[in-house]
Image: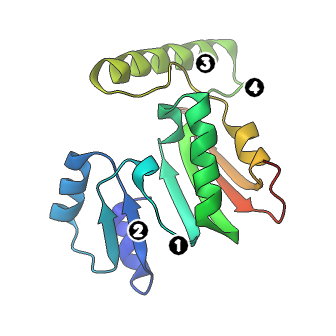
Amino acid sequence: MNILSLKNFSSSDITVVEKSKRMVQKLRKNYNIKNVNIYNLDYFEYHTARKYDLIYTTYFLDCFSFDDINSIVKLISKHILRGGIWVNVDFTVRSNSRMIVRTYMNLILKLLYFFFRRFTDIGALELPDHHRVIALNGFEKTKQIVFPFPSITATCYSKSKKNLC
């Protein structure tokens, strides 16, 4: 979500949880939005009894190990209202792409992971398949948009009535 679009939600109460101090500083410097509460925390450190009708994550799940993703999805499930929407934007390698495209995207992703592991403390070694974990935690995919290059997927999930985990 482009942060500028937050201005369209002037009557909403918005919470941003961001681990990077630099990103939080940029957010506070560039945008003076009164209804946005910013927490400079790791997502695992954010504790609230509050439930949200929309959760938006960008390039987030691809930074974690499979075990961490399961924990994160459980937290998101705890923080979202029944019928709430979760929009997740992440890199993807589409299995129905031509082999040359898959090979190229896998190479790009390996380079990105090498860079991120070298300069950050991310737990992921490769692009995780998080869709099964998301489904097991009671979310149903309602819409998906795939941007072909770079291979990015925006997926909308709805919190269903059942929770299988």
* Distance between mark 2 and mark 3 Cα atoms: 37 Å
Numbered label attached to residue 96: 4
Kind of residue sitting beneath label 2: Thr
Q: Image point 41% across, 51% down: which residue?
A: 45
Q: Nearer the viewer, residue 81 or 108?
A: 81
State whether residue 101 is above or below residue 131. Answer: above
Q: Which residue is mark 2?
A: 15
Q: Are marks 4 and 3 in contact (CB under 8 Å)?
A: no
Q: Classify 87 as above or below 110.
A: below
Residue 147 makes an appearance in the image: no
Residue 63's mark? none
CB within 8 Å, label 1 to label 2: yes
Disc 3 marks a residue whose amino acid type is Val
Q: Position of residue 40 (x, y in %)?
A: 29, 55
Query: Which mark's residue is nearer the viewer, 3 or 1?
Result: 1
Marks 4 and 3, how far apart in space? Answer: 10 Å
Circle nearer the N terminus (1, 4): 1
* Crowd tier of the residue under label 3, counting other residues whose Cα lies within 10 Å: few below 14, some 14–19, many 20 or above: some
**Dot placed on the residue nearer the N-terminal end, 4 or 2:** 2
- Which residue position holds label 3? 101
Q: Amino acid at mark 1?
A: Arg
Q: Measured along the vertical axis of the image, is residue 136 above or below residue 163?
A: above
Residue 13, position in %: x, y? 43, 79
Q: Is residue 46 left or right of residue 94?
A: left
Q: Quadrant of residue 15?
A: bottom left
* Residue nearest the viewer, comparing 81 with 93: 81
